[in-house]
Amino acid sequence: MNNITLIGMPGVGKSTIGVVLAKVLGYQFLDSDLLIQKQEKRKLHQIIAQEGNDGFQAIENRVNASIEAEETVIATGGSVVYCQEAMEHLKSVGTVVYLKLSLNELSKRLGNLKGRGVVLKEGQTLADLYRERTPLYEKYADIVIDQEGQDLETCLQAVLETLEKQKK
């Protein structure tokens, strides 16, 4: 399969880069968070508030594990790496690209995490979340793109060049 799945922390630009990457490649673009909202007819933060973190992750796992696509750039929610079934499915249908950014840069970009529909445990900080998720992103990634100090265009070029090298 020839899909490209973008993973990484909230605020790294998975959706932004995903849309542009899809245009450049002539692919479709799919935002799995929007797919979850459409299927559930609720916003992410409402699902988390009503179902709790475990309930949300069960929904996230089900939706991401059922994505059937061809020549599509898939931007996932940051917490998809907790969903083993979903991640195995996404790896089986294409290349998984981890968009990496330092905690320092992320904290500059992110405002209210709860309003973004970010899965946080009680009392968990952005730093806690970063430390918990980074090993999972690295575990599932076929490609890691370090975006530190890069603008959108530079990051996009890095993704395209790395994908091209991988084909050879």
Image (spheres, rainbow, N blue to C red):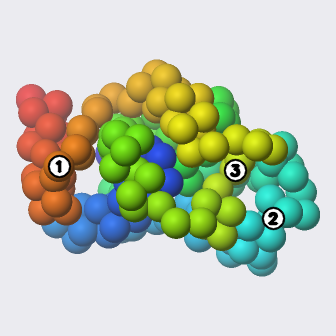
Which residue lies at the image location 24% right of the left edge and 68% below the top edge? Answer: 20
CB atoms of marks 3 and 1 within 8 Å: no
Q: N-terminal of the two: label 2 or label 1?
A: 2
Q: Residues within 10 Å of mark 2 (few under 14, many from 20)?
A: many
Determine whether, in the image, residue 24 is placed left or right of residue 44: left
State which mark lies toward you, 2 or 1: 1
Q: Amino acid at mark 1?
A: Gly
Residue 58 horizontal/vertical position (percent) = 79, 45
Residue to which mark 2 is pinned: 47
Q: N-terminal of the two: label 2 or label 3?
A: 2
> Considering only vertical position in the picture, is 46 above or below 140?
below
Which residue lies at the image location 67% right of the left edge and 36% below the top edge? Answer: 83
Which quarter shows the C terminus?
top left
Determine whether, in the image, residue 89 is placed left or right of residue 139: right
Residue to which mark 3 is pinned: 119
Q: Amino acid at mark 3?
A: Val
Residue 149, disc: 1
Determine whether, in the image, residue 12 is placed left or right of residue 136: left
Q: What SS does tag 2 mark?
A: helix
Residue 3 horizontal/vertical position (percent) = 36, 49
> Considering only vertical position in the picture, is 163 above or below 33?
above
Q: CA distance from mark 2 to mark 1?
A: 34 Å
Residue 7 horizontal/vertical position (percent) = 44, 44
Q: Amino acid at mark 2?
A: Ile
Which residue lies at the image location 64% right of the left edge and 56% below the top edge? Answer: 118
Q: Quadrant of residue 163?
A: top left
